Amino acid sequence: SAVISQKPSRDICQRGTSLTIQCQVDSQVTMMFWYRQQPGQSLTLIATANQGSEATYESGFVIDKFPISRPNLTFSTLTVSNMSPEDSSIYLCSVEGRSGGPYGYTFGSGTRLTVV
Amino acid sequence: KNQVEQSPQSLIILEGKNCTLQCNYTVSPFSNLRWYKQDTGRGPVSLTIMTFSENTKSNGRYTATLDADTKQSSLHITASQLSDSASYICVVLGLSSGGSYIPTFGRGTSLIVHP
């Protein structure tokens, strides 16, 4: 399966500021996914990032708040903008495996964000 | 609405004991079901992936079962170790009308193994 490097692993940020999270994959993948995991909750899909096109956002998430870049097939960033304490969560990126389809979801190690 | 329900929410066992975690789902149409282990502060790591036709799949001390008729799955951990302390997440993939795979995540079972 793919290997994902996600950074930063954690950060403490002031409200009103923005944080950009990076994910680097060791192989080319078509789709990358960004998730949020709030304390005690399951993972919630924020958006799907395809190379060369705008990200597709899930209900409740908007591009102005969570802009995503996908400049090539191995890299993506998620920015959490104008942060508030409610944005404190773990943010995870995920990719499909090389075999394609659903058989190889791999997750990054996560970014633990605390907004104060 | 697609849903994945896991039980128990949390579990505490002694090292060396066995335990079983449950996952019930209402995802349709069904593609496959996965169990992930998530250590505190880390991303989820895949344990097993089961398709419709598979009833049992093992990965070391982890054995997953799937009953597609009753839409239930279980994860059995044998001879638990302290390192098994983690959250175990059940994920069910269904097919959307557009032909893409849509994952539905359970909230996870928090397992604590005490020495």
Image (spheres, coloured by chain):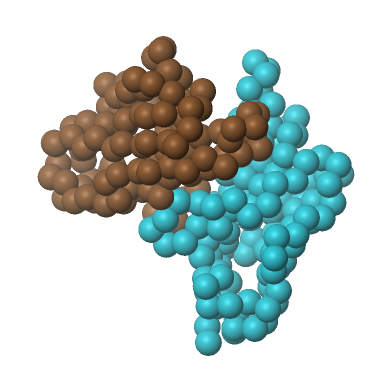
Chain colours: A brown, B cyan
Residue A34 position within the rendered picture, expressed as x and y whole percent measured from the top left: 42, 34
Q: Nearer the viewer, residue A49 or A46?
A: A49
- At x 69% / y 26%, what residue is drawn? B95
Quadrant location of the N terminus of chain A in the rendered image:
top right
- At x 86% / y 42%, what residue is drawn? B53
Q: Which of A59 and A56 is in front in this view?
A: A56
> In the visual, does A5 lie left or right of B72?
left
Quarter location, residue B27: top right
- At x 13% / y 36%, what residue is drawn? A16
Residue B62 position within the rendered picture, expressed as x and y whole percent measured from the top left: 69, 64
Query: Seen from this angle, which residue lies furthest top?
Result: A53
Q: How many marks?
A: 0
Instruction: Let me know if residue A68 appears in the view.
Output: yes
Residue A5 position within the rendered picture, expressed as x and y whole percent measured from the top left: 38, 43
Query: Seen from this angle, which residue lies furthest bottom?
Result: B115
Query: Seen from this angle, which residue lies furthest front?
Result: A26
- At x 21% / y 37%, what residue is drawn? A19
Quarter location, residue B13: bottom right
Give above or below for B66 relative to A23: below
> In the visual, does B8 lie left or right of B66?
left
Residue B98 position within the rendered picture, expressed as x and y whole percent measured from the top left: 65, 15
Instruction: Let me know if residue B1 appears in the view.
Output: no
